[in-house]
Image: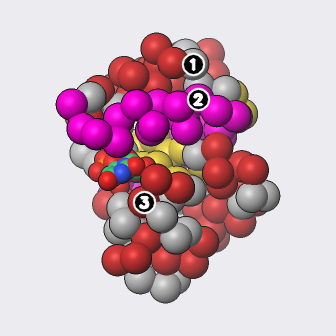
Amino acid sequence: MEQTYVMVKPDGVQRGLIGEIVSRIEKRGLKITAMKMHQIDEETAREHYKEHSDKPFFEPLVEYITSSPSVSMIVEGENAITIMRSMNGATKPIEAQPGTIRGDFAIETGRNVVHASDSKETAEKEIALHFSESETTTYSRIDEVCLYE
Ligand code: UDP
C-alpha cells in the first residue's frame, strides 16, 4: 500500500475544516495511520518547502505555515499519492475544480488549506520529517474487503 503525507494547513485549522477534510479522506476509503496537531517550527517549515527556497513566496509561506497549528497525517491506500493530490485540487484555487478541497474551500494560492505529497520520494521524506516511528500505526480497516478487489 502506498503512503502519503497530508497536512491541514493553519488556515484550514483556523477555519474549522479539520473534520471536513478528515471526513473526505475517510469516506474515500483511504486509511489514516497517523495524525497529530502541532505547530510546525521554522526549521521544519524551511526543510519541508526547501524546493521553493529561491521563490518570492518562500518567506511568506514559511511565516504562514508556522503561524498557528496544523494537522499532519499519514494517509495510506492503493495510489494514495495520486488520489490525495486529486482530492486536494490544483495548487491555485482559481484553477481547482469544484468538488476538490481547494475548489470548495479556498480562494488564494497562499491560503490553499491543504498539502499532500507529490511523489513517492517526497512522501517518504515528508513522513520522516513530520513523524517519528512511534507516532505511526499499522492496522486493517474493516471495509478494506469491500474497497479492494
Ligand atoms: N505557494 C504560494 N504562492 C505561489 C505558489 C505556491 O504561496 O505562487 C504556496 C502554496 O501554499 C502551495 C505551496 O506554496 O501549496 C507549495 O507549492 P507547490 O507548487 O509545491 O504546490 P502544492 O504541491 O502545494 O499543490
Three-letter amino acid code at disc 3? Answer: Thr
How would you rate the neighbour count of disc 1 (Cα within 10 Å): few for under 14, some for 14-19, many for 20 or more?
A: some
Three-letter amino acid code at disc 2? Answer: Thr
Three-letter amino acid code at disc 1? Answer: Asp
Circle 1/circle 2 CB separation < 8 Å = yes
Q: Secondary structure at mark 2?
A: loop
Task: Examine the image and state in which quarter residue 3 appears.
Answer: top left
Q: Which residue is mark 3?
A: 109
Residue pictured at 36% horizontal, 61% vertical: 91
**Magenta segment, which residues?**
54-81
Was residue 92 drawn as part of the magenta stretch in this picture? no
Circle 3/circle 1 CB separation < 8 Å = no
Residue at mark 3 to residue at mark 2: CA–CA distance: 17 Å
Q: Which residue is mark 1?
A: 41
Q: Secondary structure at mark 1?
A: loop
For the C terminus, the quadrant is: bottom left
Q: Secondary structure at mark 3?
A: helix
Q: Is residue 125 left or right of residue 143?
A: left
- The answer to whether the beta carbon of the residue marked 3 is less than 8 Å from any atom of ligand 1 is yes
Q: Earlier in the sequence, mark 3 or mark 1?
A: 1
The one nearer the camera, 96 or 140, is 96
Q: How are the colours assigned in the image?
A: secondary structure
